[in-house]
Image: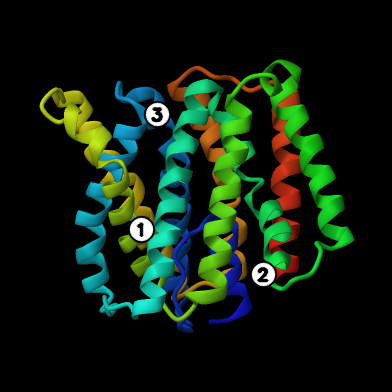
Amino acid sequence: MGHAQRRLTTTLGCVSLPQQSISSPAARETSLLSLHFAVLLLGGIPLFSRLIPLPTTAITGYRGVIAVVCLLPIARMFRIPLAIRGRDLALVLLGGVLFALHWWTNFAAIRESSVAVAIAALYTSPIFTAWIEPLFERRLPSSRALAQAVAVAFGVWLTAGSAELAGRGVWLGLISAALLALRNVLQRRFLVAYSGLLIMLYQSAVTALVFAADAWPHLTALDTRSTVLLLVLGAGFTALPHALVTHALRTLPATRVSLILALQVLYVTLLGAWVLGETPSLSVCLGAAIIVATAIMAGRQQS
């Protein structure tokens, strides 16, 4: 796997497959449109934390179950081998636990804060990666990583403000970002031989198991609205966008894909304003822009 494809996994934990060169302009245009649609769907995921009246642990568990049901036939469609070797399986399962906690803390952060603040905090993940990855190589983070951390801290302060920083929302968002970064470092260093879609399938299954005890008691109490929203979350906003990103990587340069994925922050902020009435202030927009710009630069340097 090339450096550019690896950066996609580092940035947002998205799927990655070897890219195939397809010269047809029509194919590239179709992939570009489908990619923007995928990013729009990914940006809509945080809304479900507010729209579904269930504990965040239960939402996370059901999301994992539905994602597995949808991702399995997609993996078959792409002819992805499902077997994982023994030692690698242990790392996949460990990454699954980290991924499950990442999903849960992300939803919890949105419950405790605004959608824009929570997603901006989540986008600090590449900065955590720049600090965590050197530890696996027994060296200290670079001075550049320190400067990026300072820039992101300033962006978080602008986005959250003093009142939010005193609350739980932004801290849960940062914990979620750190969990995602650790999971992605493990995946990038030890599991690059496997498709990101396959890893997502396994780790969605782990997520379902981790939160099964919390999700099961709510099964009989689910009303029609909550059931539909859970199905839409797991199928339409989890499995579908990951399949679309997988398809886009077959026709578009991975660097371009990673930059388009950064639009998730814009999309989720606009969706939060439209669906939930959460209009971000100027400081929130400025802080989010600083975080995203720093994250993109960190992703480029990690390549």
Picture residue at 38% right of the left edge, 62% below the top: 93
- Above or below for 60 versus 92: above
Question: Which of disc 2 and disc 1 is earlier in sequence?
Answer: 2
Q: Residue 203 carries which label?
A: 1
Counting from the top left corner in percent of width and height, residue 76 is at 21, 73
Picture residue at 27% right of the left edge, 78% below the top: 83
Left or right: residue 274 compared with residue 282: left
Picture residue at 40% right of the left edge, 29% below the top: 49
Left or right: residue 180 compared with residue 286: left
Question: Which of disc 1 and disc 3 is earlier in sequence?
Answer: 3
Q: Are marks 1 and 2 in contact (CB under 8 Å)?
A: no
Q: Pointer 2: what residue?
A: 136
- Asked if residue 247 can be seen in this view, the reply is no
Q: Distance between the residues labelled 3 and 2?
A: 34 Å
Identify the residue at the far left of this view. 220
Q: Pointer 3: what residue?
A: 49
Q: Which mark is residue 66?
A: none
Left or right: residue 237 compared with residue 99: left
Counting from the top left corner in percent of width and height, residue 5 is at 56, 73
- Above or below for 282 versus 7: above
User: For mark 3, does the 10 Å Cα neighbourhood hold few (<14), some (14 to 19), or many (20 or more) residues?
Assistant: many
Local SS, label 2: helix
Q: Distance between the residues labelled 1 and 2?
A: 22 Å
**Which dot, 3 or 2, sits closer to the camera?**
2
- Above or below for 105 versus 225: below
Question: Which of disc 2 and disc 3 is earlier in sequence?
Answer: 3
- Rendering colour mode: rainbow
